[in-house]
Amino acid sequence: MVDPVFLSTFWDVIWATFVVFFVLMPLIFLWAFALIDLFMRRDIGWRKVLWLAFIIFVPVLGPLIYLLVRPDEYYASPYQEGVRDA
């Protein structure tokens, strides 16, 4: 059970709000973006399972490393610029 004195002063509430909005929320969004990007990719095949385990079991460094080392082929357009269908 949470100690009721934890948020007893104005500054305790300010610091708790700061931690939630500027630390926890960005980490949750980073984790969610990495998982969404992982499941939308079709080019990594069986390595998706390894990345999934890495992102889930290493919660802070996993998504950061995934987003830094992932290949950019997914974002390449399947259509060449200037070519139109007849």
Image: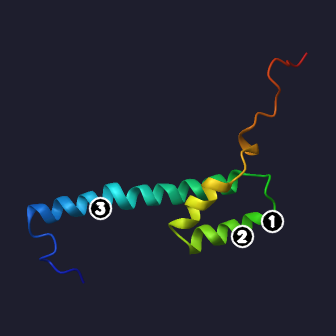
- Left or right: residue 7 versus residue 24 is left
Q: Which residue is mark 1?
A: 46
Question: Which is more N-terminal, label 3 or label 1?
Answer: 3
* Cα gap from disc 3 to disc 2, whole angstroms: 31 Å
Q: Residue 53: give x, y in percent of width and height.
A: 65, 72
Look at the numbered disc 2 and give the secondary structure of its residue: helix
Q: Which sits earlier in the primary sequence, circle 3 or circle 2?
A: 3
Query: Disc 3 marks which residue?
Result: 19
Nearer to us in this view, 39 or 57: 57
Query: In the displayed structure, does residue 25 sit left or right of residue 5?
Result: right
The residue labelled by disc 2 is 50
Horizontal and vertical percent position of residue 75: 71, 40
19 vs 43: above or below: below
Image: 4 above or below 48: below
Which residue is at 81% across, 60% downward? Answer: 45
- Give the residue type at disc 1: Trp
